[in-house]
């Protein structure tokens, strides 16, 4: 039986804005796992925690566009429409396979794992509605240099879906800052398309999710771009290091867990290496940021001891130190999807409706549980001015 939509928490009241200059929502890449982020956003929206800045990579970039490209009252609806589109109910082989499992009495995690694999196989064969479709001719038999030779799938349907569900004029007003990351294929450099520097178009979103060899590179202004997850699957550093710095409440929503048990077989090894690769060492990044911020605070205290002589202040090296000094505070709230035992390395392309609903509900419930901790929304009193929360 398919999972039901998360029931709106009618007992949760909209909160007063927390005492931070900026609320940021940071969304990692992870394909079909991305409905977890939609569930998290639903809970945040119901609590009145609307972001001032949303940044994403790959599927996180798509979810970010759906949020930034709609008014607050329509954002959850837009997310729901996208995820129901790309997880259109399965027909054919998965349905028959599910009936066969039921007929022979297979139940539990083992049966669910087999069914998920069947759905993932169907995605490989048929694509995902409104997202990507398999090319009629294999790229191995296409002319070198043609876009058909670059990938197994065509992502043209995604453009139509984005144009239907996202108001790009709204994104480009800058009312909510928006960023998506991609990799320049020619230079190998990471690049962010940001409303402070770019006019955002559908191709910027598509570039962030152009993961080869499944998807082709996206052409933008004469350059070709691949999925930002090839370098970093999280926009955390981009947001935290951006100037001018502001007191920030950041919700970091990850779809891959860096921590996990040692795998016992080859399928487990494939899954574990995928988790490690795409988690992008979020915890290491936050720990490094804490160290940096403590140094910036200490530097600020030292700068206060420098004589207020104008000539001394004009010294370039003193000015460099002054510019790095920082007394801002940061709460980094981590919500990390924890895969079920029956989910395999195909979990990021298992686009079944039932699994989508489960991921969405999981994100919603994890966010509700996190928001029950009042310290999440309070300014930190730590020496480094940084508090990191992960209620695993």
Image (tube, rainbow, N blue to C red):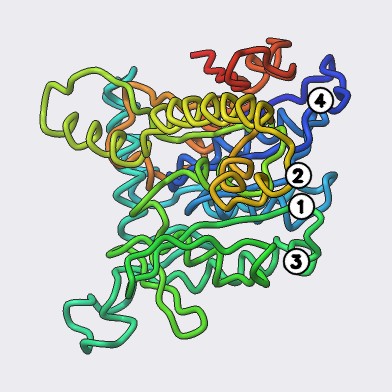
Q: From mark 2 to mark 3, how far is it between C-alphas?
A: 14 Å
Point out the tag, 2 or 3, that comes first from the N-terminus: 2
> Do we see residue 47 in this rendering?
yes
Query: Residue at label 4?
Result: 19
Of mark 2 and mark 1, the one earlier in the sequence is: 2
Around disc 1, counting alpha carbons within 10 Å, would you say few (fewer than 14), some (14 to 19), or many (20 or more)?
some
SS at badge 1 = loop
Q: Mark 3 — residue?
A: 172
Q: Nearer the viewer, residue 324 or 306?
A: 306
SS class of the residue under badge 3?
Answer: helix
**Which residue, given by chain and number where applicable, does mark 2 sit on?**
52
Q: Secondary structure at mark 4?
A: loop
Residue occupying the point 57% across, 55% down: 62
Q: Identify the mark at residue 176; answer none if there is no mark.
A: 1
Residue at point 46% right, 40% down? 33
Which quarter of the figure has residue 9? Answer: top right
Label 2 Cα crowd, 10 Å radius (few <14 / some 14-19 / many 20+): some
Callout 3 crowding tier (Cα within 10 Å): few <14, some 14–19, many ≥20: many
Distance between mark 4 and mark 1 Cα atoms = 18 Å
The number of callouts visible is 4
Residue 136 location (% of width, % of height): 31, 77
Separation of disc 1 and disc 3 at Cα? 9 Å
Residue visible at 24% across and 34% down in the picture = 271
Alpha carbon separation for disc pair 3 and 4: 27 Å
**Pointer 4 with pointer 1, Cβ within 8 A:** no
Q: Choose between 310 and 131: the one closer to the eye.
A: 310
Q: Are marks 1 and 3 in contact (CB under 8 Å)?
A: no
Q: Position of residue 355 (x, y in %)?
A: 47, 35
Residue at screen point 45% across, 59% down: 209
């Amino acid at each position: 039986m398919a999972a039901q939509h998360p029931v709106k928490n009618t007992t949760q009241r909209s909160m007063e804005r927390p005492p931070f200059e900026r609320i940021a929502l940071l969304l990692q890449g992870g394909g079909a796992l991305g409905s977890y982020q939609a569930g998290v956003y639903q809970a945040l929206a119901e609590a009145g925690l609307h972001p001032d800045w949303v940044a994403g990579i790959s599927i996180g970039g798509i979810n970010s566009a759906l949020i930034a490209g709609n008014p607050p009252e329509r954002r959850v609806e837009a997310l729901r429409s996208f995820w129901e589109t790309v997880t259109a109910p399965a027909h054919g082989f998965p349905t028959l396979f599910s009936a066969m499992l039921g007929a022979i009495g297979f139940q539990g995690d083992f049966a669910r794992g087999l069914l998920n694999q069947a759905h993932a196989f169907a995605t490989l064969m048929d694509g995902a509605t409104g997202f990507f479709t398999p090319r009629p001719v294999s790229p191995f038999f296409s002319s070198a240099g043609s876009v058909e030779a670059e990938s197994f799938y065509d992502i043209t349907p995604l453009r139509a879906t984005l144009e239907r569900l996202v108001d790009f004029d709204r994104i480009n007003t800058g009312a909510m800052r928006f960023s998506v990351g991609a990799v320049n294929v020619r230079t190998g450099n990471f690049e962010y398309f940001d409303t402070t520097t770019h006019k955002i178009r559908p191709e910027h979103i598509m570039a962030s999710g152009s993961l080869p060899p499944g998807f082709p590179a996206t052409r933008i202004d004469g350059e070709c771009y691949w999925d930002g997850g090839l370098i970093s699957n999280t926009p955390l550093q981009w947001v935290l290091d951006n100037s001018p710095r502001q007191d920030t409440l950041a919700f970091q929503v990850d779809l891959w867990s860096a921590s996990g048990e040692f795998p016992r077989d080859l399928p487990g090894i494939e899954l574990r290496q995928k988790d490690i690769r795409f988690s992008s060492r979020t915890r290491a990044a936050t720990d490094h940021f804490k160290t940096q911020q403590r140094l910036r605070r200490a530097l600020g205290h030292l700068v206060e001891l420098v004589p207020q002589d104008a000539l001394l202040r004009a010294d370039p090296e003193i000015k460099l130190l002054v510019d790095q000094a920082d007394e801002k505070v940061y709460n980094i709230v981590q919500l990390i999807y924890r895969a079920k035992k029956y989910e395999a390395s195909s979990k990021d392309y298992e686009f079944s409706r039932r699994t989508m609903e489960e991921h969405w509900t999981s994100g919603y419930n994890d966010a509700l549980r996190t928001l029950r901790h009042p310290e999440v929304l309070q300014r930190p009193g730590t020496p480094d001015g940084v508090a990191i929360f992960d209620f695993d």
